[in-house]
Image (tube, helix red, strand yellow):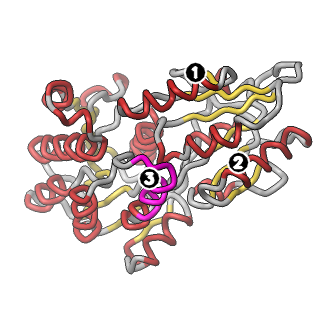
């Protein structure tokens, strides 16, 4: 039996979907004792135990915490971690937590008799994340754009050491851990799948507009400036839809400035499915991503994708068949692939995931 915990609401966003997948997989496999989450699925009844984040919300609203993405992320993760540690009761064989939010939970779980501590690595090794985020900040002269600060890095390294098993969801992530000296015996490669609702549409727009779609967090480390610079030189008719929200005031101002200069750019927060059903191409320009649910959802909808070399999604992309892999942070390479797809459209079949 396994107990799980994650501070991203069940089924919401990439990490929340990741968590929901693991809950269902646990229920069908080793057995689900219960899980801890801010918004459990109602259908799970008492097996989904809610943990409020009101204390963190108060701090974020009324203190300078809201001005620092790194500190905000660290404190939110740590608050949740401590609440999980306090809520753990009767032990099961396994406790599974997510990276950056499990150190206190691990210590508590070990002390009350859990046999195996399992860590879910959403991203590549934390030192690889730090290196690539630093590249993004330097390239676009936006300091403090990363959610990773040194406190979060040190805590993550301690979690790696404490975990009996680390779950990785791409070869890219696995290779980054091996390169950092984590033994292969500690790593478990697993596979994630998009929700079944992501399927090709029955009908697509029949016009000449070249529709580019991005889905995800709106920040520098996700490569939004790379995409914006590549898109702005595309000739009309073209449209760029960004589905997501900005985590900081700095990014809000950044995107508002771009929307004022580029009338073909629009924000569309909420469900990404309508945008994917109209898209000609999906772009995932991230400086680092351990897997990438959004481009996998695009492929499931029959939309070709462009991803970077520093994302786990690259192993699902066949150049010229269902999309392209481009060098991380390279505006010219991304622009070239966008222009190519405009001239030579692709309509890939949905992927088969192991």
* Secondary-structure class at tag 2: strand
Between disc 2 and disc 1, whose residue precedes?
1
| Side of 197 where 187 appears, left or right | left
| Side of 150 where 130 appears, left or right | right
Which residue is rendered at x = 23% and y = 64% of the image? 154
Residue 161 x, y percent position in the rendering: 25, 71
Q: Residues within 10 Å of mark 2 (few under 14, many from 20)?
A: many
Q: Quadrant of residue 265?
A: top right
Residue tagged 1: 260
User: Comparing marks 3 and 1, which lies closer to the viewer?
Assistant: 1
User: Comparing marks 3 and 2, which lies closer to the viewer?
Assistant: 3
The C terminus appears in which quarter of the rendering?
bottom right
Q: Does residue 322 appear anywhere in the picture?
A: yes
Pick out the residue farthest to the right.
343
Q: Is residue 78 magenta?
A: no
Q: Which residues are magenta?
A: 131-142
Between disc 3 and disc 1, whose residue precedes?
3
Separation (CA) of disc 3 from disc 1: 23 Å
Residue tagged 3: 137
Residue tagged 2: 306
Q: Quadrant of residue 293?
A: top right
Comparing 240 with 123, the one in front is 240
Q: Is residue 135 magenta?
A: yes
Of helix, strand and loop, which mostly describes the magenta segment? helix
Which residue is rendered at x = 65% and y = 56% of the image? 330
Which residue is rendered at x = 45% and y = 61% of the image? 124
Q: Is residue 10 above or below residue 309?
A: above
* Secondary-structure class at tag 1: helix
User: Comparing marks 2 and 1, which lies closer to the viewer?
Assistant: 1
């Amino acid at each position: 039996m396994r107990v799980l915990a994650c501070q991203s609401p069940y089924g919401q966003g990439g990490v929340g979907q990741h968590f929901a997948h693991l809950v269902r997989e646990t229920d069908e496999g080793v057995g689900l004792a219960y899980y801890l989450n801010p918004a459990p699925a109602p259908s799970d009844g008492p097996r989904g135990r809610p943990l409020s984040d009101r204390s963190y919300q108060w701090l974020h609203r009324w203190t300078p915490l809201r001005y620092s993405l790194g500190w905000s992320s660290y404190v939110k993760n740590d608050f949740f971690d401590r609440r999980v540690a306090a809520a753990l009761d009767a032990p099961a064989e396994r406790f599974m937590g997510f990276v950056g939010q499990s150190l206190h939970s691990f210590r508590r779980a070990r002390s009350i008799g859990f046999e195996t501590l399992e860590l879910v690595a959403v991203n590549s090794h934390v030192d690889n994340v730090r290196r690539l985020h630093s590249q993004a900040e330097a390239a676009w002269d936006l300091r403090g754009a990363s959610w990773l600060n040194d406190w979060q890095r040190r805590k993550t390294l301690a979690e790696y050491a404490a975990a009996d098993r680390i779950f990785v969801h791409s070869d890219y992530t696995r290779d980054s851990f091996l390169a950092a000296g984590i033994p292969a015996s500690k790593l478990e490669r697993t596979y994630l799948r998009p929700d079944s609702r992501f399927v090709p549409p029955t009908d697509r727009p029949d016009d000449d507009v070249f529709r580019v779609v991005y889905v995800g967090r709106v920040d520098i480390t996700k490569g939004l400036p790379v995409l914006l610079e590549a898109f702005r030189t595309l000739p009309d008719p073209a449209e760029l839809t960004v589905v997501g929200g900005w985590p900081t005031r700095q990014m809000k101002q950044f995107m508002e400035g771009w929307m004022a200069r580029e009338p073909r750019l629009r924000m569309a927060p909420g469900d990404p499915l309508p945008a994917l059903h109209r898209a000609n191409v999906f772009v995932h320009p991230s400086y680092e991503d351990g897997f990438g649910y959004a481009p996998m959802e695009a492929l499931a909808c029959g939309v070709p994708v462009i991803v970077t070399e520093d994302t786990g999604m690259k192993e699902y992309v066949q150049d010229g068949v269902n999309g392209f892999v481009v060098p991380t942070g390279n505006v010219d390479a991304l622009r070239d692939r966008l222009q190519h797809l405009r001239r030579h459209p692709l309509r890939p079949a949905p992927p088969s995931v192991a």
